[in-house]
Image: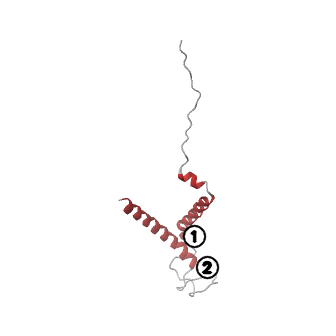
Amino acid sequence: MSEVLQSTDQFVDERPPSLVRQAFKLRRTQIGAVLSLLLICVALIGPFLAPFGSTEYVEMPNTLSVPGTVFGTDYFGQDVLSRFLFGGRTILILAVLATSIGITLGTT
């Protein structure tokens, strides 16, 4: 008679971890990702939190300690914090646009 042997070996998927998973195990990658996400959140949410408009004149030019301004005013008398928060969105849009153009031209 013939016997049928059943195998008790289980197949284990032993693929090496992906490059992204390996990178995120490093502490410096985690810190960089958190800082990048923080900057992206500030760029997206910042204009809603800005105390003044991006081109609104607040006080005399180049003053440091004006009530209501955290970083003072610039050479036009505009709030530096508001301009920083509004500028983040522009920088983010330009970065995405430049990366998209680079990928498009680099792969064709």
Residue 82 location in percent, x, y? 55, 75
Residue 50 location in percent, x, y? 56, 73
> Seen from this angle, which residue lies furthest left?
108
Q: Nearer the viewer, residue 46 or 38?
A: 38
Residue 63: image tag? none
Q: Which residue is mark 1?
A: 49
- Kindly state the secondary structure of the residue where label 1 is placed: helix
Q: Nearer the viewer, residue 30 or 93?
A: 30
Coloring applied to the structure: secondary structure
Residue at 45%, 69% in the rendered image: 94
Residue at 57%, 55% in the rendered image: 23
Residue 104 relative to residue 44: left or right: left
Kind of residue at disc 2? Phe
Residue at 58%, 86% in the rendered image: 62
Residue at 56%, 21% in the rendered image: 5
Q: Which residue is mark 2?
A: 71
